[in-house]
Structure formats: structure tokens, C-alpha cells
Image (spheres, grey):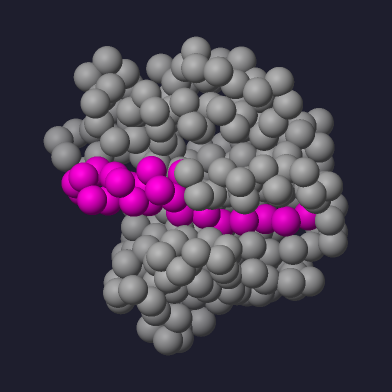
């Protein structure tokens, strides 16, 4: 089973850059999108419902042209969920979950704090509020793949300019400590990590790899590979042995993010 996660930074913009032409050539079972920046009624063109995929959107209702997540799946899910129970979070269109038997695949968009203090405070509130949700999922007995833009790097290997970004949102020590506090591996930044917890599929397959999924639009960041790894597939430990490989596709360029695919030794459930 191949699962792709991708922050489109506007699904219509990504479409105009050839994303759906590229997607049709991929052997993919589930696609998780973030930052669709559209209302579903604006996506009437058949391209937004790729062949042989069941498509589900969760739009932002706080304001149009903002946030939004989606899931495309070859197999029809048993259930689709779009709310976690906190209106301020749910109404920004940041969560959608498709359930296939025992497997849950989530498209998640963690807020960015880079636009200013107000949004950084909201990001911290989201982090505090959603951790117990993750804890419940981890204890549930279900297999989870949480795909998405987490807007946080984990360690020096996940960002080109480590030292100069220590005071910038996405690389703040408190953000890294929160994310690494969920994940049970040896690939964090030195902050405490659990003995038993979630796993970072990227690091399961290649613990020492240095690749990025996002580049600033400023300057020549992408050309010079001055990037950040902030797009993840975070999995339950039950899936550790199912991770076979992953691939990041920085070119062609559909967004300021790159599609991130993971191959799992799973049937289509």
C-alpha cells in the first residue's frame, strides 16, 4: 500500500502546476492533502476527483480560501470523520480521518505560528489540546497513519539552517520537545522521548537520511536545497515492520512542499 501526503498550498494552484497529471501516473492507494484553500463547491472539475478514488474534503468554514484537508482513497472507507470536538480547530478544516477496518488514515494540518504571536499562541493551544487525542489513538488498538504538515522539525537533520532558526516558529525548542515527546526513536533533538510511542515512518525506513519536504519561496531556497522536513507520516508501533520505503518528490514543483510517499506492506484492507 502506498500513501502520499502533500501540502498543496492551494489545490487549484497545484492542479495548474500539473499535480493531478503527476498523480495519475503514481501507483497510490491513499492521498492525504493539506491546505486545499478551496470550498468543495469550487472543485467541480473532474480532476479534483481522480479516477478510481473516493474523495473526501473538509473545508475551512472560518474563512474561504484558507486551510482545508482532503483524503482520496482507491477503496471506499468504512467511515470518514471530520471533527475532533474543538470548534476553533475543526472549523479551520485541519482534520479528516478515513477508516478501513482496523486501519485509520488521517490527514492533519497543524497550525503554523510564523505569521505572528497570535497564531503561535493558537498553535501551542492546539498542541496541548491534541496530545490527549493522540494518546487515546495510540491506546485504541487501531493502526494509525497520521499524515500531514506538522509545521515542526524534529532535529538538526530535518532543517538546513539549524542554528539560525532556533527562535523561529517550527524550530522552537518547545515545539520540538512536544513533537519528539510523542515519538519513540533515537532521532530527536535530545529532548526526552518515550520508550513506547508513535513512530516517524521516514526514520523507521532510513534513520540517518537528510531530506526536506518544504522550502521557503524566498530567494533560491529550493534551488539551494535550504529546506525543512515538516511533513510526516506518524504511525502506531504496530506498523513498524510494515514500512518498506519512502520517497520525497521535490521536482516537478507543485507547491512550496513536496509530496511524501511511504510504501507499507499492507493490503488495501
Question: Is residue 19 among the parts visible in the rendering?
Answer: no
Q: Out of 47 and 238, give the one closest to the viewer.
A: 238
The image position of residue 21, as x and y in percent, is 48, 63
Q: Quick check: 214 above or below 98?
A: above
- 177 relative to 197 in the view: left or right: left
Magenta residues span 103-127
The image position of residue 23, as x and y in percent, is 54, 59
The image position of residue 157, as x and y in percent, is 44, 19
The image position of residue 142, as x and y in percent, is 80, 50
Q: Out of 216 and 46, give the one closest to the viewer.
A: 216
Quadrant of the image containing the C terminus:
bottom right
Q: Out of 253 and 94, give the one closest to the viewer.
A: 94
Report which quarter residue 54 is drawn in. bottom right
Name the residue rendered at 81%, 31% in the picture: 241
Name the residue rendered at 25%, 31% in the picture: 168
Q: Examine the structure image and report whether residue 75 is included in the region drawn in magenta.
A: no
What is the total number of numbered labels drawn onto the structure image? 0
Report which quarter residue 204 is drawn in. top right
- 30 relative to 253 in the view: left or right: right
Name the residue rendered at 37%, 63% in the picture: 67
Name the residue rendered at 16%, 40% in the picture: 218
Q: Out of 65 and 90, give the one closest to the viewer.
A: 90
Q: Examine the structure image and report whether residue 114 is included in the region drawn in magenta.
A: yes
Amino acid at each position: 500500500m502506498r500513501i502520499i501526503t502533500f501540502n498543496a498550498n492551494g489545490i487549484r494552484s497545484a492542479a495548474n502546476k500539473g499535480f493531478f497529471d503527476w498523480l495519475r501516473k503514481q501507483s497510490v492507494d491513499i492521498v492525504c492533502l493539506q491546505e486545499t484553500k478551496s470550498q468543495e463547491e469550487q472543485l467541480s472539475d473532474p480532476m479534483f476527483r481522480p479516477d478510481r478514488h473516493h474523495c473526501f474534503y473538509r473545508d475551512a468554514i472560518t474563512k474561504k480560501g484558507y486551510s482545508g484537508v482532503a483524503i482520496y482513497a482507491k477503496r471506499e472507507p468504512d467511515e470518514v470523520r471530520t471533527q475532533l470536538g474543538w470548534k476553533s480547530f475543526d472549523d479551520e478544516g485541519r482534520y479528516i480521518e478515513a477508516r478501513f477496518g482496523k486501519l485509520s488514515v488521517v490527514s492533519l494540518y497543524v497550525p503554523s505560528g510564523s505569521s505572528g504571536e497570535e497564531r503561535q499562541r493558537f498553535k501551542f493551544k492546539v498542541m496541548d489540546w491534541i496530545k490527549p487525542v493522540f494518546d487515546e489513538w495510540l491506546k485504541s488498538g487501531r493502526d494509525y497513519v497520521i499524515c500531514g504538515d506538522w509545521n515542526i522539525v524534529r532535529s538538526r537533520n530535518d532543517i538546513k539552517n539549524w542554528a539560525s532558526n532556533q527562535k523561529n516558529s517550527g524550530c522552537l525548542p518547545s515545539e520540538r520537545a512536544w513533537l519528539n515527546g510523542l515519538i519513540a526513536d533515537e532521532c530527536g533533538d535530545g529532548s526526552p522521548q518515550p520508550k513506547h510511542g508513535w513512530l516517524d515512518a521516514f526514520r523507521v525506513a532510513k534513520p540517518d537520511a537528510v531530506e526536506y519536504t518544504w522550502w521557503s519561496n524566498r530567494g533560491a531556497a529550493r534551488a539551494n536545497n535550504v529546506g525543512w522536513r515538516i511533513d510526516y507520516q506518524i504511525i502506531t508501533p504496530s506498523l513498524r515492520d510494515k514500512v518498506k520505503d519512502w520517497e520525497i518528490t521535490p521536482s516537478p514543483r507543485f507547491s512550496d512542499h513536496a509530496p511524501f510517499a511511504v510504501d507499507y506492506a499492507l493490503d488495501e484492507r
